Image (tube, rainbow, N blue to C red):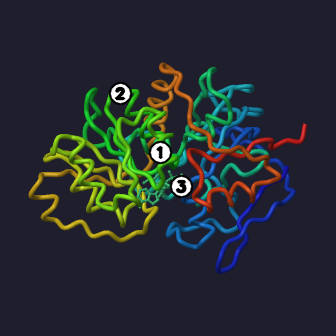
Amino acid sequence: MKAVRWTTGPKPDLECHDEPVPTPGPHDVLIRVHAASLNFRDQAILDGRYGARLQQNGVPLSDGAGEVIAVGSAVRRVKIGDRVTASCHPTWVGGVAMPEYQENSLGITSDGWLAQYILLNEVALVHIPSYMSYIEAASLPCAAVTAWTGLNLTAPLQPGQTVLVQGTGGVALFSLQIARMFGARVFAITSSDEKAEKLKGWGAEAVVNYRTFPDWEKHILDLTGGKGVDKVMDIAGEKTIVKSAAATRNGGSISVVGFTSGFGGGLPPMDILSRTLTVAGTAIGPRSDFDALMAAMAQHEVKPVIDQVFPFSSYRDAYRRLESGEHVGKIVINQFSEE
Ligand SMILES: NC(=O)c1ccc[n+]([C@@H]2O[C@H](COP(=O)([O-])OP(=O)(O)OC[C@H]3O[C@@H](n4cnc5c(N)ncnc54)[C@H](OP(=O)(O)O)[C@@H]3O)[C@@H](O)[C@H]2O)c1
């Protein structure tokens, strides 16, 4: 099979290899990969900006989908021919984010999806509903599960509540779609008027261009009658966290999700205390959340927003698209086999 692997050295690069197809152990499942998707962190790893310990010569990409083609002798959860995707933390089935679950991370500490086949333990797998394509399913494991857990982290999202999402990347658009599915009202910020129109098309009630209006938090307050939103998905980190707090209502919550504008920020404790905010870190989520998300998406037949699809042979172009920051939604790779 063909598998793309990290090179060793101070700054990782990617290299395609020919290697044997792995054989399943008793609880393993061999999957023919049909699609894989990229996340912000995949470029951050290439740039040497991602702190997590990288497996030497590992296969990148935490997200993918494919068809079960062989199962170990003890496998009970799936059968040959099933269409599956998988949790990015393959041993985290339920409960809170314990370090032992987080240390096992596809595409970082164990082989990910940028290969023609992947071997996974059956506990990681999630069935793909019939309405959803492999390309769509491959877009979900990291960004959509993060959106689901982030929106429901401190308390389940309620119909009529207000949510602020940031940008037009994977986590932001899944947050928008999931919040709308819950009957919440969504406000958004983005870098361009063109992207703002797209966000409105997907159900955002109002969108503020944060380049034109750097004091966007004041606009969000105006849009909510001076009150602020119930929940913020803080995706940009350094440049947004203080403004996110200012745009949140008294007693509201902020899910700290990302760092697209940097790792710093410095939210003063008094901003949290004086307005009784809840600030909660989000760490993707367990398979039980992925199962719940998949069931909810199937009920509403929600279609993920796919930016562009690249064939496996052009995986470098997919990374270049991610690096450009011009994407809206998910970048996916397909055509893993040449048939
Ligand atoms: N904690 C977790 O478990 C978890 C899981 C998944 C992802 N993440 C993190 O979440 C972040 C987003 O990931 P992703 O995969 O969705 O990224 P992505 O698809 O690459 O999207 C990133 C988007 O961030 C927006 N952005 C950049 N600077 C911004 C700013 N100053 N204010 C508002 N928006 C800004 C841009 O959208 P516009 O051009 O529209 O502004 C950009 O397209 C990353 O930092 C990622 O590492 C964390």
Q: Quadrant of residue 87?
A: top right
The quarter in which the C terminus is drawn is top right
Q: Residue furthest left?
A: 274
**Which residue is identified by label 3?**
104
Kind of residue at badge 1: Trp
Image position, residue 32 (x, y; %): 76, 38
Q: CA distance from mark 3 to mark 2?
A: 31 Å
In-front residue for pair 265/54: 265
Q: Amino acid at mark 3?
A: Asn
Identity of the residue drawn at 54% across and 68% down: 53
| Residue at point 43%, 65% (across, down) | 261
Q: Position of residue 147 (x, y in %)?
A: 42, 42
Q: Is residue 43 above or below residue 83?
A: below
Q: Nearer the viewer, mark 2 or mark 1?
A: 2
Q: Which residue is mark 2?
A: 182
**Residue type at the position of mark 2:** Phe
Q: Where does label 1 land, which residue?
A: 92
Horizontally, residue 89 falls left or right of residue 214, namely right
As drawn, the residue found furthest toward the right would be 339
| Label pair 1/3, CB-CB below 8 angstroms | yes
Q: Quadrant of residue 79?
A: top right
Mark 3 lies on a secondary structure that is: loop
Q: Residue 213 vs residue 72: left or right?
A: left
Disc number lying in front (3 or 2):
2
**Nearer the observer, 249 or 222:** 222
Q: Helix or strand or loop: what does disc 1 sit on?
A: loop
